[in-house]
Amino acid sequence: MIEFTNVEKTYEQGNKALNGVSMTIEDGEFVFLVGPSGSGKSTIIKLITGELKPTSGSVHVNGYSLERIRKREIPYLRRTVGVVFQDFRLIANMTVYENVAFAMRVIGAKEKEIRDRVPYVLELVGLENKKNRLPGEMSGGEQQRLAIARALVNNPSTIIADEPTGNLDPARSYEIMALLEEINNLGTTVLVVTHAKDLVERFGKRVVAINDGLVVSDGMEGYYNNEKQ
């Protein structure tokens, strides 16, 4: 579970990014986080992953209290949270298989575990026939699927996708969102940060809207459907 309670975050230069954010994302939920640039979405992601600590208030993620987490505990927190980035962040000289296996080796997984887990995850994202390709030999949609496989391979309870369709055409964007929905249906909590209004409306999930560091809307009916242009 992810829980923010009256969270404020002020950066060293004095910029106040969050101004009393409270929200709860339950285990197994699929949630869109939306809002204009500079609204505080990136700060929320950094708080969830332990990159930042709140200035005040409390952040609880998968059993960890982020306002008082010890540095040595952060790697264990991050094993419970897989992050998918807009720019993929793949290792160019590693194959599809090696990119995913590397994420397991980083946390000390045994080679037998890697041999068992990686093919399963590649099949889940539809890349089982491309395991020997390099990222540069693949389309943008395939690279994003690989990034999702890498985020999934250590079996996190939560996936955060930060603008996962930002570099993709509409058809590939829909495929990626459908894949994330399938992953959610298997029990993984999914938080998608996006500006893609059409996808938010199409998938009909819970939408948490942030503006000026505050939650301004939270519901199943969708922020964009009620937004006045």
Image (cartoon, rainbow, N blue to C red):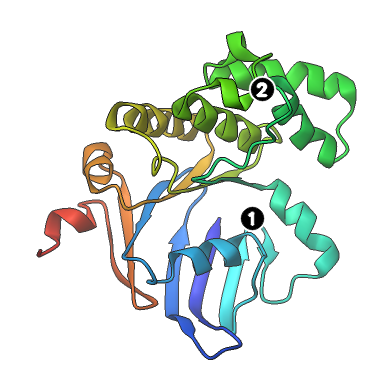
Disc 2: CA contacts within 10 A as few (<14), some (14-19) or many (>=20):
many
Q: Which residue is drawn at 54% across and 46% down?
A: 85
Quadrant for residue 118, please give it: top right
Q: Residue furthest top?
A: 129
In the image, 180 versus 62, the foreground residue is 180
Q: Which residue is drawn at 58% across and 76% down?
A: 58
Disc tally is 2
Q: Nearer the viewer, mark 1 or mark 2?
A: 2
Q: What separation in Å lies between label 1 and label 2 (alpha carbons)?
A: 29 Å
Disc 1: CA contacts within 10 A as few (<14), some (14-19) or many (>=20):
some
Relative placement, left or right, of 28 versus 113 is: left
Relative placement, left or right, of 21 versus 79 is: left
Q: Name the residue under label 2.
A: 96
In the image, 131 versus 106, the foreground residue is 131
Q: Which mark is residue 186?
A: none
- Amino acid found under the numbered disc labelled 1: Asn
Q: Position of residue 65 (x, y in %)?
A: 68, 69
- Amino acid found under the numbered disc labelled 2: Val
Mark before the other along the chain sequence, 1 or 2: 1
Where, quadrant-wise, is the C terminus in this rendering? bottom left
Q: Residue at x 28, y 32 (%)?
A: 170
In the image, 180 versus 60, the foreground residue is 180
Where, quadrant-wise, is the N terminus in this rendering? bottom right
Q: Name the residue under label 1.
A: 62
Q: Residue at x 59, y 62 (%)?
A: 48
